[in-house]
Every structure is written in C-alpha cells, then in structure tokens.
Amino acid sequence: MTGKLYGIGLGPGDPELMTLKAARLIAGAKVIAYPRLAGGTSFARSIAADHIAPGTREIVMDIPMTVDRAPAQAAYDAGALAIRTELDAGHDVVVLCEGDPFFYGSFMYLYARLRSDYPVEVVPGVSSAMSCAAVAGLPLAARNEVVTILPAPELARRLSGGNPTQTLPPSDTIVVMKLGRHFAAVRAAIEVAGLTDKAVYIERASTPDEQVMPLSKAPEKAPYFSMILIVKGADPWL
Amino acid sequence: MTGKLYGIGLGPGDPELMTLKAARLIAGAKVIAYPRLAGGTSFARSIAADHIAPGTREIVMDIPMTVDRAPAQAAYDAGALAIRTELDAGHDVVVLCEGDPFFYGSFMYLYARLRSDYPVEVVPGVSSAMSCAAVAGLPLAARNEVVTILPAPELARRLSGGNPTQTLPPSDTIVVMKLGRHFAAVRAAIEVAGLTDKAVYIERASTPDEQVMPLSKAPEKAPYFSMILIVKGADPWL
C-alpha cells in the first residue's frame, strides 16, 4: 500500500481562510511538502504554521525565480523524488499550496509527475480572486455575468502584438492577475479601453500588508501578488 | 453602535470545506440569516448546521423560484428589513452563503440593500468552480492560461441569436455554470465547437451525491448545481 498525495489549498494569506479540512489534514500529517523561493521563506508554510505538529517531516523545494524554466523544473523533479520515497513507504504526503492548488498553483508540477503512480486528492481552497472581490466590496459575478481571468503576462504578450483596444475581453468582469513587472503595460491598456474608473487595485489581499484602492490611485510598482479587478457595472448586483 | 453584517462563504457543499473563519463566526453568531427555496430546505443552513449554537435566532428568506424576479426581490426586501432591525439593535448578523458570497451568490441582493447603512464584511469561500476542478483532477488554470466563466443562461441567450460556433470564448479553460434547463443547448454548442472530448460534467461537487464524468457520458438532464469544465490542453500543466 502506497501513501496518498494531498494537494491542499491554504487560501490567499489569512490563516483563518484555510478550510477545516486543510487544517485537519495538516495537523495529522507526518510528512508535508512545499515550495519556497530559493534563499527565502515559504509563504505557504507561514500560512499553515499553526497547524503543523512538532516532529512533522518537511520536504522543501527551493524554487529559483529565473526566466529560464529548467532550474525550477529540476527543483520539482527533486521534490517529486523525495515525495515518491515517502509515498512508496506508505506515508501520506500533504503538499501546502497558497490559494487553490489548481488555480495557477505550482502543485500542478508535482501532480503531473506523480498522478499516474499514486492516489491523489486535491482539497480546494479560497482563491485570491474571491478574496480580492471580498476586500474590494465588489461582486466578482452577479446573475448571468461572464467573468474572464487573464494573467498579466498573457495580456502583455497580446499587447506586444497589436492594438491594445482589442486585448481586453468583452466580459462583464475581468480579473488581471500576477501584475508584477507587467503592471505599467496593463494599466495603459485599461486606460486605452476606457475602463480605469471601473478598476480596483488589490495587493496581498487578506494579509496584514493588504492594499485596496482605485487603480487611478495605485502606486507605480506592483508585486507579483497583486491584481486588478474590473467590474463594468457600477452597481451590477442591483 | 449598529451591528455588523457578515456575508459568509460556506464552500460548495462539504461542511469541511468551510473556512476556519466562517466556522468561528457562525458559532459565535446570535443572529444568522439565509435564503431557502420556498417550501423547501436551505442548502446553506445544512452546510453550516454543526456550527450553529442552540438559541441562535434565524432569519429565513423564503425565495420563490419563478421566472418573474419580483417575488424573489420582495422576499429579499422582507429579509433585509428583518436584518435591519437586528443591526439597529446593535446585533451582528451572519448571512450564510453557499460557495463564495460574491460568485453568483444571492448575498449580493442583501448587500445592495444594506451596504450604505451598515458595516459589512464579506468572508470569501471555496467556490464551486475550484471544487469541480479538484474533483475532476483538472487544473482550472496553469501558468498564464486564460479562464472564462460563462453561465449557461447567458450562453443560451447567445446561441439563440446566431452561429453557435461563435458563442464559446477562445479561452484555455471554460467553465459553464448553472446548467439546469439549458443543458441540452450547451451540450450541442460544445459538440459543434469540437470540444466534447475536452469537457467534463460535474454535478453537486463535494457532496455525497457528487457525479463526475466525461460530458459524452453525462445523462440527459442536469440540475442547477452542475457545471461543465472544458480544459483545452490535454495535459496543460506539463
């Protein structure tokens, strides 16, 4: 009997936005695994910290932040190998994931390497998109509205190819994720589309460093953990 | 001092997919409020049941399921009035919401009526979209993929107007929600678009009645709480 692999969503940052199931599985885990930025700390582990029992074994994947994907993939290779050893010995392994594991999560790299050989359960979590809507006081979707979630790097790629007015989808709500170094380009595209007055900027939602403001008042630089929420109706829920 | 209004996401159905914060606020609430189908039971209350303390006052909104919106809006009017009475008396009111309050949630009808006059906090929850991706074993979004969430009634409206090949967005992932009586039309549009082999049907995710299967094997009728997940890459996370 091999162990089971769990991919566990921890929510967007506030440890209280973890699910009861996530807290139970982490507290009962003999082995946990998580990525961290090479040389830094792990945001995922910090969210889960209060539930990790003393003596829990920890498999840490040091992920280099390079444009070249190969070094990061090598780190997931090594992590998957360490996880295999535990699973083969019959131990369950709980992988800690910021937000939701299947919503732009790095869990998928482990999932791709292990899902054919072991039982896997994904425990969904509160995503950053839901959390940002909550703190902005704006419904992500009302009635039969259409929502598009668009990562900033993809929007930037489209912008570099042509007319910026054609790069934002016609949806009722647009969520632009992962702003980081693409923030200026995204902001310009929203301005060209005449949507700046419908746009809210949110940074590190649900954490002590949370920032929420109209896009027109946002600072010049945005971290990776930031997004813009464009809700086209002024009072779309009425 | 008036009370505070909380809109609390309960997750998609499994009571363990509630957040720690939701469980704490429900357990501590003196007053809760929730909608139910007129004459039926409340799904939201059933998810929260284990956390509701004896003696908690309950404001129940009986929502008639009619095509005409006026009767439902009258029920929310009456509910908002009862909630006002509690808030004016300085009591917090916790509104129970299936899934996430701002993701196609009925909480927005109370929010619209009360947000100008009282402090409001929205506690995000695990949405049905995340839950469906988890049980289907398919990532909703990988890397810089674009996701569109499209309610079936809106897709049906578009289909009635023209060429069905132009009604599905070009996104990497498409989530079609609220299938119900539009299921046959949605299914036909997916077939015309050549996407049936990328489509998974999910019903009542995370509940004991959960069903997950390829769309090609789905039954003819679908309930309201069902969705289709179309993930265009075969192994999009690799």
Image: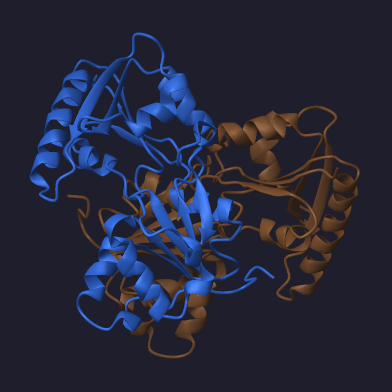
Chain colours: A brown, B blue
Q: Quadrant of residue B55?
A: top left
Q: Is residue B55 left or right of B61 when viewed as pictured?
A: right
Q: Foreground: A56 or A183?
A: A56
Task: Looking at this view, name the residue that lies furthest to the bottom.
Answer: A162
B143 w.r.t. A59: above or below: below
The N terminus of chain B lies in quadrant: top left
Question: Residue A147 location, x and y as percent?
Answer: 36, 63
Q: Residue at x 68, y 34 (%)?
A: A25
Q: Foreground: A98 or A19?
A: A19
Q: Residue at x 56, y 36 (%)?
A: A19
Question: Residue B38 location, x and y as percent?
Answer: 20, 32
Q: Foreground: A5 or B189?
A: B189
Q: Quadrant of residue B47?
A: top left
Q: Is residue B73 left or right of A142 when viewed as pictured?
A: left
Marks counted in the figure total 0
Question: Residue B37 location, x and y as percent?
Answer: 24, 35
Q: Residue at x 31, y 74 (%)?
A: A170
Q: Is residue B177 left or right of B13 when viewed as pictured?
A: left
Question: Residue A36 location, x and y as percent?
Answer: 74, 53
Q: Is any atom of residue A204 visible in this view? A: no
A115 w.r.t. B35: above or below: below
The C terminus of chain B lies in quadrant: bottom right
Task: Looking at this view, name the residue that lies furthest to the top.
Answer: B55
Q: Residue at x 45, y 74 (%)?
A: B171
